[in-house]
Amino acid sequence: MKNAGVKFLLSLAVCLHSTMGVGQIYPAPVAGDFVIKDFEFKSGERLPELKIHYVTIGQPVKNSQGMVINAVLVLHGTGGNHSSLLRPSFADVLFKKGGLLDGEKYYIIIPDVLGHGESSKPSDGLHAKFPHYAYRDMVTTQYRLLTEKLGVHHLRLVMGTSMGGMHSWLWSEMYPDFMDAAMPLASLPIEISGRNRFFRRMIIDPIRNDPDWQNGEYKAQPVRGLTTAIYTLMMMGSAPLQMQKQGPSKDAADQLFDTQVKLRLAATDANDLLYQVDASRDYNPQPDLEKIQTHLLAINSADDAVNPPELHIIEREITRVKHGRFILLPITDDTRGHGTHTVAVIWQNHLAELLTVSEPKK
């Protein structure tokens, strides 16, 4: 209950800041739940009821054939939820009146993806007996949310941050005719390998190897393993320029470190994190990049330690995408490392170009 309370308060604070009072600048999010009966995972495991929680902003607009034409799917990163994308640096920039994804013009759909937020996840009660979902399972549930619950059979845009960016690559391959445009942020179109795989093992292994994990049946969080995992997340997601500004002295850095670890420990369940990180094991869009038919714009930041630019992977692979383009954002005083994906003011001009070039013909 403690973790749930912390997550609720954090989510509520973000929502209140973004959508209430005199300063409201986009339509208030409307929450809903979609329950899928007897869902079968790629592993063959089944769940009698699988819940996907979501919020929508704005209203659907239909053409003369009854098809929704203004839907936008926005997908969050590992460990996040829909409130991650209601931060002022993201939502206030994009969803405001006159913004590129104006909530009065677009029908914006932001799910808590499988295993996250208020959607079905291990900490709901099954613990390590929860089905071992992977990325393609997650995208399948998103597709079913749109088509079976919301009546959306075409997207103006699918976009996502980090894990959501990887899901955007998969969306473009699994459902190539479903969207006009795709914009994966902070991701690579290859299987999880190299340092990225090391990074994930440095989260997974300490939790599994902690005796207090008890094969997932712990009564209290396995603090030693979970703390090590959080150390790894903090370092890989950090931006040196910003961290130096926030902790310019030893004492300031120590205080910042201790505060961040305490907050993350209070808001993280070990099984949930373990599943979230391990879910990337089936991710590999590389073999089928030629299947992508939509206009796709991939954006990374040069200070992103998770997707380091010196690998030159997207520059090589984007040539296989028929309408593909890649932008590498230079390091500036405004970039935030891996977290640049939610600082929309930095890359919104590129989104504007994507929306223009992918505008459906009348």
Image (cartoon, rainbow, N blue to C red):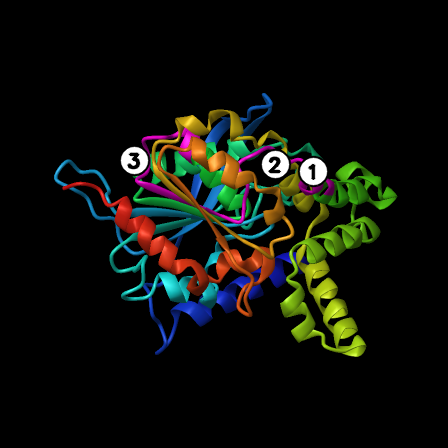
Mark 2 or mark 3, earlier in chain: 3
Residue 33 located left or right of residue 121: left
The foreground one among 106 and 162 is: 162
Is residue 307 among the parts visible in the rendering? Answer: no
Q: Quadrant of the N terminus?
A: bottom right
The magenta stretch spans residue 169: no
Q: Position of residue 348 (x, y in %)?
A: 39, 59
Which residue in the protein does label 1 denote? 194
Q: Nearer the viewer, residue 331 or 114?
A: 331
User: How far is disc 2 from disc 3 in space, using C-alphas?
Assistant: 26 Å
> In screen coordinates, is 278 left or right of 8?
right
Q: Nearer the viewer, residue 322 or 254?
A: 322
Residue 72, position as x, y percentages in the image? 34, 48
Position of 207 with respect to 73 (left or right) is right
Q: Which residue is mark 2?
A: 280
Q: In x, y percent, where is residue 21?
A: 37, 76
User: According to the image, label 3 marks what residue?
Assistant: 153
What residue type is disc 1 on?
Gly
Residue at horizontal 53 percent and vertical 68 percent from the top: 334
Magenta segment: 172-198
Eye-nearest disc, 1 or 3:
1
